[in-house]
């Protein structure tokens, strides 16, 4: 694990974010007005996908880790901003975790 120690905090943030985004998307699908949640669900799925990819590339000490972390920060910010617009507990939690992950990814990309 020593070879990617510099990435460890960001990898953990990305994996947590992906997990919470998946949960949020699933929970949004159970809401009464699913159509109103469409953008949230879409961003949750995109964010989870990018977070998993970023964590995977960082874990192999990949050459594109910094660039991928920049993209990940952008999508996490967008997802967090969208989730923050909704009153559901799962969206509030997702917004908080996405914004934290965006901060971690920005630090990694710097």
Image: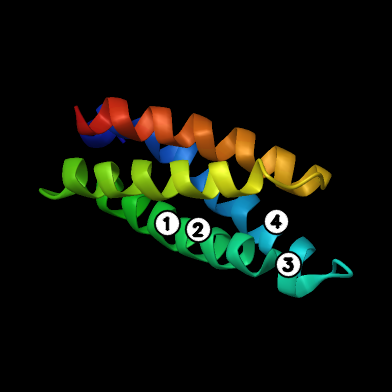
Numbered label attached to residue 52: 1
Q: Residues within 10 Å of mark 1 (few under 14, many from 20)?
A: some
Q: Is residue 41 above or below residue 61?
A: below
The relative height of residue 27 versus residue 101 in the rendered view (above or below) is: below
| Circles 2, 1 touching at the beta carbon (< 8 Å) | yes
Between 24 and 36, the residue placed more toward the observer is 36
Cα gap from disc 4 to disc 2, whole angstroms: 10 Å
Tag on residue 74? none
Badge 2 crowding class, 10 Å Cα cut-off, few under 14, some 14 to 19, many 20 or more, is many
Which one is nearer the viewer's eye here, 37 or 30? 37
Give the number of the mark in front: 2 or 3.
3
Could you give the CA–CA distance between mark 3 and mark 4, rounded to whole angstroms?
A: 14 Å
Whole-percent x and y of residue 86?
74, 47
Question: Residue at the spot x=21%, y=35% of the render?
Answer: 3
Q: CA distance from mark 2 to mark 3?
A: 20 Å
Compared across the picture, whether 101 is left or right of 70 comes to: right
Residue at the image position 29 percent from the left and 25 percent from the top: 107
């Amino acid at each position: 694990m020593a070879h990617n120690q510099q990435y460890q905090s960001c990898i953990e943030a990305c994996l947590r974010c992906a997990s919470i985004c998946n949960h949020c998307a699933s929970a949004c699908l159970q809401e009464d007005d699913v159509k109103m949640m469409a953008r949230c669900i879409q961003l949750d799925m995109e964010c989870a996908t990018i977070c998993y990819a970023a964590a995977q590339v960082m874990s192999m000490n990949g050459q594109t880790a910094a660039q991928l972390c920049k993209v990940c920060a952008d999508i996490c910010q967008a997802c967090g901003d969208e989730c923050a617009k909704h009153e559901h507990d799962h969206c509030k939690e997702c917004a908080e975790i996405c914004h934290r992950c965006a901060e971690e990814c920005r630090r990694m990309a710097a």
